[in-house]
Amino acid sequence: MPTIELADIRLAYDSINDTAPNTLLLVHGHPFDRSMWTPQMQALIGHECRVIAPDLRGYGESGITEAPTTLDRFATDLFGLLDALGRSSAVLCGLSMGGQIVMEMCRLRPQRVNGVLLTATFPQAETEEGKLRRNQMADRLLREGMSGYAIETLPKMLSERSIRDQPDVAQHVLRMMSGAHPIGAAAALRGRAQRPAYEPTLASLQCPATIVVGDEDAFTTRADADLMERLIKRSSLLWLPGIGHMPNLENPQAFNAALVSLLQACEQK
């Protein structure tokens, strides 16, 4: 497992096709880790693109800090990782919180973004109710740990059909959530509660973009998906029937095809 030491944190990551000229950065969501991207890493072996999948600060095998981890902190970490690996720009792919981190990266340094894939995410700022709810959940995770939360949340992460027909996927998702460190998860929840609105960032994007959302996603609505497609000038929307909050795991064939198509569009731009 390779790691990179940044100013105040160690990031663990996986990487394939290390000498390829182009770069794809895969940004996981909460409360997951880099293993959620295994089907994508396997599908892209041999592609003309270096694929990098890190564990975010506070997750997986990366270091943990207790202070609220805001999205700009995550974004700065990831730019630091790209710098350390000698990559000046990348196509960014993020799921849920990872998608919002991608939006923050686009806000901070759009010149370093060659394309984006946003899946199971939305650009709106947190509401006052949402801020309260995230902070209360952070308190609960610190008090109780991750196991009860993971069992309770699984039906919101995957569609009923995916849980029934893909037990290995359901176990993988449950294992990631149960294994997340409560301090890291709580720090991310508190930081995410502070997120800004990303509609202006999406409206200013000039690179190719793909939006992937499942029609049984408990967190991202069709209205959210349509909004992102309207805002981003060079975007397309893949709406997946019978899929919940984890399209890359629930329907990897469709997700991978959309990702490869985006990479090809970015190579030609």
Image (tube, helix red, strand yellow):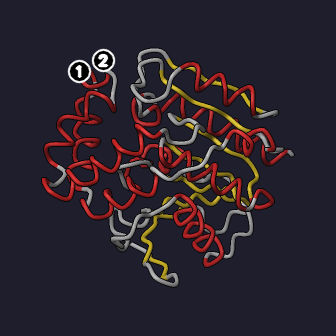
> Label 2 is placed on what type of residue?
Arg
Q: Position of residue 159 (x, y in %)?
A: 33, 22
Q: Residue at x 20, y 59 (%)?
A: 142
Spot occupied by residue 148 in the image (x, y as percentages of width and height): 14, 43
Residue lying at the far top of the rendered structure: 241
Image: 159 above or below 135: above
Q: Say which quadrant the N terminus sits in.
A: bottom left
Label 2: how many Cα within 10 Å (few below 14, some 14–19, many 20+): few
Q: Is residue 201 above or below residue 54?
A: above
Q: Cα distance, mark 2 to mark 1?
A: 5 Å
What is the number of the mark on residue 161?
2
Would you identify the image quadrant in which residue 78 lies? bottom right
Return the residue found at the far right.
269
Q: Which residue is mark 1?
A: 164
The answer to which image quadrant residue 3 occupies is bottom left
Task: Report helix, strand or loop for mark 2.
Answer: helix
Q: Residue at x 79, y 44 (%)?
A: 205
**In the picture shown, does residue 206 fall above or below 227?**
below
**Vertical arrangement, residue 37 with respect to residue 4, above or below:** above
**Residue at 49% from the left image edge and 79% from the top image edge:** 4
Q: Label 1 amino acid?
A: Arg
Q: Do the numbered discs 2 and 1 sit on residues whose CB atoms are within 8 Å?
A: yes
